[in-house]
């Protein structure tokens, strides 16, 4: 049983806050992803949970026990980092076995546990190789196996895929997802990659500048972003955002007019996703094509409406020339509204 509670966690260096007033409960066996741009405080949060960094303020609870004053080795946590940090002179078997030796686990158990961990990450055939004889993906899997072999209460993973090439990242991501389903261990996973977050997480914590912006399931943060930061960070492409003015349920901005909205009068930021709009139809936007991208299963059409670039997903056989005027339909029902000043989501009735 390893529920983790972070109560008002703050990390401050002088007057700079790396993490500020973080409150979060991570359920036993949950897979939680910390997501945000570089420098937002993800690694700092992780290092405080691991005990590698002291929290300036707040309580860190693991399994109901306050662990702020416990050494990292006493927290029953296994970590996997971006750099694999394998021992170059040890073969795969000995690298995976190392934590068992350090922890003085009875030798009779080693062989079975090492083999089981290696099999889980499909390294069974490579036991006698040195790290230098492995690919990057295989090395990262050794690091995973070395974490698994300990059977810890908590896994912390900090950008474990970021040294892998794009294809390997996708396959290793799938393996981590499958592994976490089998192991059922509380996991905190750090990434700046929103696709990794969306595909792996039970819940995502979106951070920016040391502050939590939103906590929710992937579906919640995708469908109901709490503010324009989350809206523009999640999704590929990001949510389209346009400045304009609401008047009696009509939104108007440069090259755009949408009727039938429920929102306040005055300046407002409108948002909608590329796949929710369509080319043709209601012509809420009419603007010249800025670029056209063939995605295979669809064609992404980007137009320039006033100062804003707006992307719409069109059928895969849609074609147009750059500069052609196209009409885009944006039904009121797919629109999100945000406060023009603060960026906070406005709940539309
Ligand atoms: N030891 C330190 N002293 C001062 N500032 C630090 C220290 N470690 C990290 N920071 C700063 O704290 C912020 C958060 O860092 P970090 O948690 O590593 O971000 P992330 O992992 O999200 O990229 C960054 O602005 C970073 O420069
Ligand atoms: Mg980091």
Image: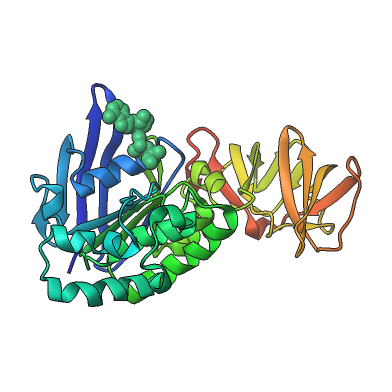
Residue in the picture at 86% in, 59% down? 318
Kindly indicate the quadrant of the structure image that contains residue 180: bottom left
Residue in the picture at 23% in, 37% down? 10
Kindly indicate the quadrant of the structure image that contains residue 19: top left
Extreme residue toward the top, this view? 14
Residue in the picture at 77% in, 46% down? 302
Q: Nearer the viewer, residue 225 or 270?
A: 225
Q: Is residue 49 above or below residue 200?
A: above
Q: Nearer the viewer, residue 343 or 25?
A: 25
Q: Dividing the image into four quarters, tell me where ligand 2 lies.
A: top left
Q: In this view, does 8 lie above or below 168?
A: above
In this rendering, does residue 42 appear at all?
yes
Identify the image quadrant of the N terminus: bottom left
Would residue 235 be found to the left or right of residue 125 on screen? right
Residue in the picture at 37% in, 61% down? 142
Position of residue 90 measured from the top left corner of the image (x, y, whole percent)? 30, 56
Q: How many labels does the image show?
A: 0
In this rendering, does residue 258 appear at all?
no
Q: Is residue 278 above or below residue 311?
A: below
Position of residue 57 measured from the top left corner of the image (x, y, whole percent)? 16, 37
Kindly indicate the quadrant of the structure image that contains residue 289: top right
Q: Nearer the viewer, residue 86 or 314?
A: 86
Would residue 209 be found to the left or right of residue 270 on screen? left
Position of residue 340 measured from the top left corner of the image (x, y, whole percent)? 55, 35
Q: Is residue 331 above or below residue 22?
A: below
Q: Which colour scheme is used?
A: rainbow
Position of residue 86 measured from the top left corner of the image (x, y, whole percent)? 33, 51
Would residue 61 be found to the left or right of residue 31 on screen? left
């Amino acid at each position: 049983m390893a529920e983790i509670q972070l109560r008002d966690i703050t990390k401050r260096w002088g007057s700079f806050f790396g993490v500020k007033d973080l409150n979060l409960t991570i359920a036993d066996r949950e897979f939680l992803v910390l997501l945000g741009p570089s420098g937002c405080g993800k690694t700092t949060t992780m290092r405080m949970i691991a005990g590698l960094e002291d929290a300036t303020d707040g309580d860190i609870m693991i399994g109901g026990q306050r662990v702020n004053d416990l050494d990292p080795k006493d927290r029953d946590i296994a970590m996997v980092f971006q750099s694999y940090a394998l021992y170059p002179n040890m073969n795969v078997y000995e690298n995976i076995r190392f934590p068992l030796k350090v922890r003085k686990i009875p030798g009779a158990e080693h062989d079975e546990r090492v083999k089981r961990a290696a099999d889980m990450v499909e390294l069974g055939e490579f036991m006698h190789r040195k790290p230098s004889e492995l690919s990057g993906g295989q090395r990262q899997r050794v690091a995973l196996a070395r974490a698994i072999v300990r059977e810890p209460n908590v896994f912390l993973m900090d950008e474990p895929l970021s040294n892998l090439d794009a294809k390997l990242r996708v396959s290793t991501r799938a393996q981590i997802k499958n592994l976490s389903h089998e192991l059922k261990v509380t996991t905190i996973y750090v990434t700046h990659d929103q696709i990794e977050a969306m595909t792996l997480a039970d819940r995502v914590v979106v951070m920016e500048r040391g502050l939590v912006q939103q906590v929710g399931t992937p579906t919640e943060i995708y469908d109901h972003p709490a503010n324009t930061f989350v809206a523009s960070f999640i999704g590929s492409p990001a949510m389209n955002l346009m400045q304009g003015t609401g008047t009696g349920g009509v939104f108007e901005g440069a090259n755009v007019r949408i009727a039938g909205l429920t929102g306040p009068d005055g300046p407002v930021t409108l948002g909608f996703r590329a796949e929710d709009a369509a080319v043709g139809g209601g012509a809420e936007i009419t603007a010249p094509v800025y670029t056209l991208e063939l995605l295979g299963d669809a064609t992404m059409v980007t137009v320039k409406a006033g100062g804003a670039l707006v992307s719409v997903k069109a059928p895969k056989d849609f074609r147009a020339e750059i500069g052609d005027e196209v009409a885009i339909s944006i039904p009121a029902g797919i629109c999100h509204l945000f406060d023009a000043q603060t960026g906070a989501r406005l709940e539309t009735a």
